[in-house]
Image (tube, rainbow, N blue to C red):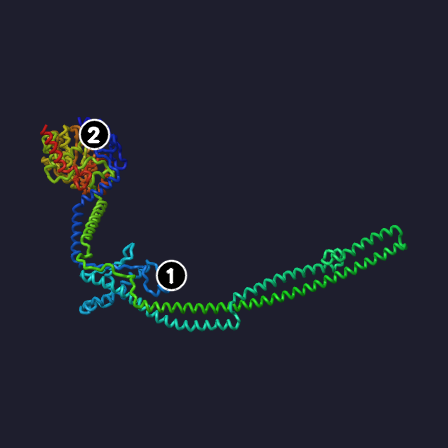
């Protein structure tokens, strides 16, 4: 029933053009072995996990050795204890009274100030007095191997750590030593010496500043006296009481003269224009001038006389008394007009000259006022300079007097900008080395390196280990895998069993062989399989074991099966099946026996054995020409013909056999056979046009492939025990 179901599945068959390997696909995609396909990312993770499992003991040993070595080193390292004292820095407190009273308005940036204080703590100016206070130099002098003063200061500086508590104005001073008491004492001494050093340096600076300021006060007093005397002398010489009160009248007078000059110059320009018109001799020009009103009556009288004269001339003509009288009158009027015209012109000329003189006098007066004002301005500037100098000298003198008084007060002032808020205490717990943290780090690092090393070693390993990676790595179908068997009896469980379906007597190895048998029968439903050769790349692959058990499994299904030992170099089939090897394949090839003579019954029904026979070099040469006829003859008598062959690499016999059978089964030892060997073998088989049914991966361990760890003896026995109990209860 099972075989009928497998035949109804109708898998699709595809052929690998490069290798000649047939690939069969089931209804749900490529799955010739019944295993589901796995995404590449999952395959990578599975491969890495397999590498870790394979090298698990190496990783454990490496981790244990690393942790033990680290612990040994930690035991050799001297312990160090740490004392920490805390100093509070108050930037709101002035560092010195002098700077505060002197009117320093600029604020010191807190960040650089704290950084400066932290650097100052580890300076020799602070460390050296602290060492002297504790007597470390005295003890160092008594020891012949003790370092010198400079080396001791450098040693203390290297062991001292100054840090700022983030977000606060607290400075931690930490010192490490082999003694807890010494660590606390040195830390406290450094803090106290730092505060004392700040006071001493500030006090020394104040004394130097006070002495300097006394000299400056004396010099400034003399200079202030000289500048004040110079100012008083200048006031007396120039009769200057208040420059601002004298500047205003001069400025007003200058403005008034400037306006007057502008009016006179305007009047002068008007008279000069009238004079130019009068000199032209035109009555019309004189009439439009300022003096033109005097000519208007005369011109009217002249016009009236001309009208009357014209009337008499038209009535009486020349020679008439009235005519001549009117003519004399007209002449007199014309002379009067000319005389008045000359008189007006003369008046205009006189007025123009007078206006020019007046404008000149005003301009001269304006120039005098300007000169006087300029002289006064120069004197005012000089006066201001002298007054500014006197005032500045006086202000500086007063400021220095105030600073000098403040320096005298500050000389004994202790600033509270630095104060100790937490003294260091002896701590019995060492801070170095960090045993637990270091061991944990060594454990994690060694574990990580061990895992990475196992993965790298696995990636560099060219052998085939994981059954799940056969198709991806080589493009060969996986017929099945065989677990590693330590019990030799399990290797012959199918051969020694008398039951056609052994049942509970089976073991994982036998179950795996039966799975391979089912896969081959599934292929037989597509293309008939009568002759099958089992090959390997190199010796010790488990090829003969696969041949014997596969033949026994097929015979158990009722198929007449013959197994042929074609490995004429190192025949091993007769030993495995416990049959004589007096005659065999070599006898048949040399025509020393017929086929019926060399066929021997196997340990189970329907299984026939054709051993290799006695060694013969000539028989190996005849194998290439006689193997085809032999296979065809055996196919006519048996349902299945299985041939055991020598390794492919280095021997030509296997290639001759491969060309004579229907399909080949390649047996590869997990973790032993290099991938390059398999590729070379597949290339040779492709050249002889041999058909490879697939690969059997032998010797698979649970550590080799985590995908198949369940197919172990322990899992199998638990499952079979549960089923046995269940069946017995039925």
Q: Quadrant of the N terminus?
A: top left
Q: Nearer the viewer, mark 2 or mark 1?
A: 1
Q: Is residue 353 left or right of residue 472?
A: right
Q: Position of residue 610 (x, y in %)?
A: 13, 33
Residue in the image at 15% along x and 41% along y: 540
Mark 1: few, some, or many residues within 10 Å (few <14, many ≥20)? few
Location of residue 271 in the rendering, given as x and y in whole percent from the top left corner: 69, 60
542 vs 402, left or right, is left
Where is residue 22 shown, x and y percent of the image?
Answer: 24, 33
Q: Which mark is residue 137?
A: none
Residue 40: % across, % down: 26, 39
Give the residue pinned by disc 2: 524
One can see residue 601 in this view: no
Q: Which residue is mark 1?
A: 105
Secondary structure state at the residue bearing disc 2: helix
Classify mark 2: residues with Cα within 10 Å, few (<14), some (14-19) or many (20+): some
Left or right? Give the position of 162 relative to 291.
left
Mark 2 vs 1, N-terminal side? 1
Which image quadrant: the C terminus? Answer: top left
């Amino acid at each position: 029933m099972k075989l009928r179901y497998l035949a109804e599945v109708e898998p699709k068959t595809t052929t690998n053009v490069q290798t000649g390997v047939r690939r069969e696909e089931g209804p749900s995609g490529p799955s010739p072995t019944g295993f589901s396909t796995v995404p590449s990312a999952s395959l990578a993770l599975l491969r890495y996990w397999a590498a870790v499992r394979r090298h698990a003991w190496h990783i454990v040993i490496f981790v244990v050795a690393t942790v033990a070595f680290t612990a040994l080193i930690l035991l050799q390292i001297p312990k160090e204890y740490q004392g920490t004292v805390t100093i509070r820095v108050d930037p709101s407190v002035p560092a010195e009274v002098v700077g505060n009273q002197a009117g320093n308005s600029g604020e010191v940036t807190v960040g650089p100030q704290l950084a400066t204080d932290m650097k100052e703590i580890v300076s020799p100016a602070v460390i050296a007095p602290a060492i002297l206070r504790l007597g470390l130099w005295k003890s160092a002098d008594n020891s012949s191997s003790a370092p010198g003063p400079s080396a001791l200061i450098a040693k203390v500086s290297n062991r001292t750590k100054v840090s700022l508590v983030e977000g606060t104005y607290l400075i931690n001073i930490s010192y490490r030593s082999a003694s807890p008491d010494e660590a606390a004492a040195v830390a406290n001494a450094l803090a106290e010496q730092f505060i004392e050093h700040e006071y001493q340096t500030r006090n020394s600076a104040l004394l130097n500043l006070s002495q300097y300021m006394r000299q400056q006060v004396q010099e400034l007093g003399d200079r202030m006296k000289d500048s004040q005397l110079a100012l008083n002398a200048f006031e007396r010489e120039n009769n200057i009481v208040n420059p601002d009160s004298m500047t205003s009248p001069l400025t007003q007078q200058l403005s008034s003269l400037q306006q007057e000059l502008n009016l006179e110059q305007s009047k002068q320009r008007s008279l000069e224009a009238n004079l130019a018109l009068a000199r032209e001799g035109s009555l019309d020009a004189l009439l439009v001038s300022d003096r033109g009103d005097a000519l208007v009556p005369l011109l009217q009288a002249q016009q009236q006389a001309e009208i009357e004269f014209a009337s008499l001339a038209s009535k009486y003509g020349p020679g008439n008394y009235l005519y001549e009288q009117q003519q004399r009158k007209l002449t007199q009027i014309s002379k009067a007009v000319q005389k008045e015209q000359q008189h007006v012109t003369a008046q205009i000329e006189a007025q123009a000259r007078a206006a020019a003189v007046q404008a000149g006098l005003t301009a001269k007066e304006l120039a005098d006022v300007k000169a006087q004002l300029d002289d006064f301005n120069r004197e005012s500037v000089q006066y201001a300079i002298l007054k500014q100098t006197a005032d500045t000298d006086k202000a500086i003198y007063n400021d220095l007097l105030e600073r000098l008084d403040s320096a005298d007060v500050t000389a004994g002032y202790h600033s509270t900008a630095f104060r100790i808020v937490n003294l260091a205490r002896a701590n019995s717990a060492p801070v170095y080395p960090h045993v637990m943290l270091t061991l944990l780090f060594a454990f994690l690092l060694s574990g990580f390196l061990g895992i990475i090393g196992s993965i790298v070693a696995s990636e560099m390993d060219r052998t085939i280990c994981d059954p799940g990676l056969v198709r991806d790595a080589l493009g060969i179908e996986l017929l099945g895998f065989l677990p590693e068997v330590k019990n030799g009896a399990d290797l012959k469980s199918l051969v020694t069993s008398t039951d056609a379906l052994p049942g509970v007597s089976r073991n994982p190895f036998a179950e795996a062989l039966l799975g391979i048998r089912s896969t081959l029968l599934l292929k037989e439903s597509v293309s008939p399989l009568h002759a099958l050769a089992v090959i390997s790349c190199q010796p010790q692959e488990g090829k003969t074991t696969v041949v014997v058990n596969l033949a026994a499994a097929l015979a158990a299904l009722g198929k007449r099966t013959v197994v042929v030992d074609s490995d004429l170099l190192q025949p091993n089939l007769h030993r495995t099946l416990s049959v004589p090897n007096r005659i065999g394949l070599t006898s048949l090839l040399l025509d020393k026996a017929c086929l019926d003579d060399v066929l021997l019954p196997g340990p189970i029904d329907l299984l026939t054995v054709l051993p290799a026979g006695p060694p013969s070099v000539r028989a190996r040469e005849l194998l290439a020409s006689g193997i085809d006829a032999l296979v065809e003859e055996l196919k006519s008598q048996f349902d299945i013909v299985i041939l055991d062959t020598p390794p492919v690499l280095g021997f030509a016999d296997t290639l001759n056999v491969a060309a004579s059978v229907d399909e080949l089964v390649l047996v590869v030892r997990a973790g032993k056979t290099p991938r390059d060997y398999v590729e070379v073998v597949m290339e040779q088989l492709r050249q002889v046009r041999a058909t490879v049914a697939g690969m059997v991966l032998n010797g698979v361990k649970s550590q080799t492939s985590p995908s198949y760890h369940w197919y172990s003896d322990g899992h199998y026995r638990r499952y079979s025990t549960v089923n046995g109990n269940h069946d017995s209860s039925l």
